[in-house]
Amino acid sequence: MLYSSTRQGSGATEAPRHFCDILLEGLAPDGGLYLPQHYPQLDAAMLQRWRGLAYADLAFEVLSLYIDDIPPDDLRRLVRQTYRAEVFGGNPAIAPVTPLREAGKDTGLFLQGLSNGPTLAFKDMAMQLLGHLFEYELARRGQQLNILGATSGDTGSAAEYAMRGKQGVRVFMLSPEGRMSPFQQAQMFSLMDDNIHNIAVTGVFDDCQDMVKAVSNDLDFKRRYAIGTVNSINWARLLAQVVYYVSGYLQTLAHTGAPADLSGTPLSGWPRVSFTVPSGNFGNVCAGHVARSMGLPIAQLVVATNENDVLDEFFRTGVYRVRGSADTWETSSPSMDISKASNFERFIADVLGRDGVATAALFGQALAASGEFRLSDAQMARVREAGFVSGKSTHVDRLATIRDADARHGVVIDTHTADGLKVAREHHQDGTPMLVLETALPAKFAATIVEALGREPGRPQALDGIEALPRRCTVMGTDVAALKAAVAAACGG
Ligand SMILES: *Cc1c(COP(=O)(O)O)cnc(C)c1O
């Protein structure tokens, strides 16, 4: 499988590349994002065979379709090291599907648990694999990598827990001092691994991000210290996420009593399932789009946003209008507080039939000039054919949905998942099972759970008392020179 840029042909041209060549990189040189040149197609025999597989072996099958430059035995070992029950809350299903029942009856709604990893949010699903892939590829190349990032919570901790103790990788993670939740601070700062460096900046998140950009823009420094990132546009992260859509689909077949042998039925005759995805940067739901494009029988992909409704506006109106930081609200589902959706370009490139020049015209020129673009009616018809619909949820909805899920279904859900469930109910069609992706555990956002339910959410036992552990963190001003000095010192000068 070869990969090329969503903006192919619009600027600096580059020969198509293999998986491991884009693994350690961010944007393509022309500013676009990497996509496989085509989506491999599933068939009935294949899906039937996959119905009985353990999660890691399913991951191997899916990844093998996209990775031809890692020997199969090595790839199988890497996914088996990654997707172990011990790493994902002790549950061998790794991404288990549970029906939401009411008064003992099925409702057709299901939760798919993606937040049983070490940091209790779905980003672990992909980031844990990335840790193993990075270590493998860096060793193969005899290279080192210094990951530099800024976080306001979920991404930074997922990256640290994925990279801790890995050979060849160091992580320098900047966060705004005192602004993450006490639980998130405890999670990150209690890591004692030599290769993990927490830096608390006396400023806000944007200051952290500006410092990271300033260092990355110093090309000499960047090259000398092999500075890289693990941001959400990384193709390997997206690919890892495709696996749980396939797993969620196959588990739902079992829950809904589908015939045991469907190998003789073409995929068009298999039961269809819909997914609702609490969305921010469009990384999670873009993996759903890839799965559907491979032929997985998905009816709808429902995009749920919070008050930051850039994506809901697009799917309703065809206008994509990015927001400034003054128009980006801080909400009680903070991991969805985005002003632009960094993975969205991948989906639009598909809608535009992979016309790289047209994609560059929208994401390069139009956004730079006016901060927005509008798709034509014909293009929006293709968006609908791809199964997309959307909806939005606010703080009041979130509280009501958390209470409702507790009262009707006896489950406590986190704030992001609540946004998903609220919107899922609006699009749920009779006879089509609806899976809501659970993107975090409630323990991570305890304050809002207390506001909704008047009680603290439960917490996985392994994390009891985490706030009392010793911490390792360097406090720094908004000082780029100090940051460079810290990186240089950790690298031995
Ligand atoms: C990152 C995150 C999201 C948003 O996912 P995207 O891939 O950015 O759309 C939703 N919920 C939680 C808990 C997250 O950490």
Image (cartoon, grey):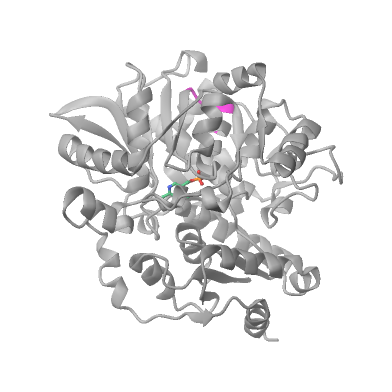
Q: Is residue 306 left or right of residue 144?
A: left
Q: Residue at image x 72%, y 70%?
A: 226
Residue 46 coordinates in the image, percent (x, y): 53, 27
Left or right, residue 304 beside residue 289: left
The residue under the point 36% across, 40% down is 394
Considering depth in this image, is 28 or 251 the residue closer to the camera?
28
Instruction: Quadrant for the N terminus, please.
Output: top right
Number of dots carrying numbers: 0
Asked whether, in this view, residue 108 is left or right of residue 193, the answer is left
Classify 405 as above or below 170: above
Q: Residue at x 47, y 79 (%)?
A: 473
Q: Is residue 295 magenta?
A: yes
Q: Position of residue 102 (x, y in %)?
A: 17, 30
Question: Which quadrant would the C terminus be assigned to in this image?
Answer: bottom right
* Viewer-side residue, 48 vs 341: 341
Q: Does the stretch in magenta take in 277?
A: no
Q: Residue furthest left?
A: 103
Picture layout, residue 82 above or below residue 388: below
The image position of residue 67, as x and y in percent, is 66, 44
Q: Is residue 208 visible?
A: yes
The residue segment tinted magenta is 291-298
Q: Going 66% across and 21% down the picture, which residue do you hit? A: 379
The image quarter in which residue 173 lies: bottom right
- Relative to 52, say whether 478 is above or below: below
- Furthest-front residue in this view: 326
